[in-house]
Amino acid sequence: MSDFDPTQHRMVPAQRWFEDFVLGERFVIPSRTQTSAVFAAFQTASGDTHPIHYDVEYCRARGMPDLLAHGFQTLVHTAPGAGLFPYVVEESLIGFLEQSSKFLKPVYAGDTIYPALEVIELSPGKTTGVVTLRSTVHNQRRELVLEGMQKFLVRRRPS
């Protein structure tokens, strides 16, 4: 018999509840370079076959340096599951409620993007609360290319 306990096999050391979040807390998501493979995978998943996303010469003829990423291709990198957020709320997360985003600057093939989520609002309820996260994506030139918001319904700590 082993001392192994599967309930202790966690990405983060402790479960968190609504009350455990603080304004300004950040959840960094690993950076990703937008390679041709990322473009191809997104094209396959989305069904978007416009040449601006896969034909370099088409893009260059229109004044762009390389393939232009679809806005949703950039947005997908703000998925909380790519970082630690869902691991800290494994037992308390009820659901993903809302998402919005603004696409501020183009993202091209070869760009490296740096997504992050930041707690900007905490709305308590009786047994749950809404955690609002600001989502941001910067590029390697330190430019903000995407800004948005995500809301999650999280249980309060059981009594």
Image (cartoon, grey):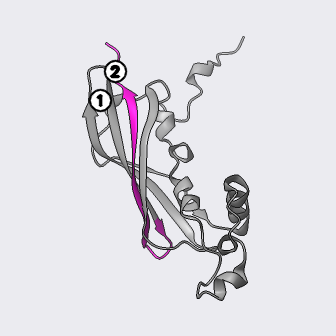
Q: Which residue is mark 2?
A: 157
The count of marks equals 2
User: In terms of image quadrants, where is residue 59?
Assistant: bottom right
Q: Which mark is residue 136?
A: none
Residue name at image x 47 percent, y 40 percent: 85
The three-letter amino acid code for the residue at tag 2 is Arg
Q: Which residues are magenta?
A: 138-159
Measured from the top left, where is residue 75 in percent x and y?
52, 57
Q: Main secondary structure of the magenta part?
A: strand
Measured from the top left, where is residue 90 in percent x and y?
50, 28
User: In terms of image quadrants, where is residue 70?
Assistant: bottom right
User: In terms of image quadrants, where is residue 76?
Assistant: bottom right
Q: Which residue is mark 1?
A: 19
Residue placed most toward the observer, 6 or 51: 51
Residue name at image x 42 percent, y 42 percent: 98
Q: In what element is the residue under mark 2?
A: loop
Q: Up-down: is 112 above or below 123? A: below
Measured from the top left, where is residue 45 in percent x and y?
70, 53
Q: In what element is the residue under mark 1?
A: helix
Quadrant housing the N terminus: top right
Residue name at image x 61 percent, y 86 percent: 62
Direction from residue 18 to residue 59 in the image, left or right: right
The three-letter amino acid code for the residue at tag 1 is Glu
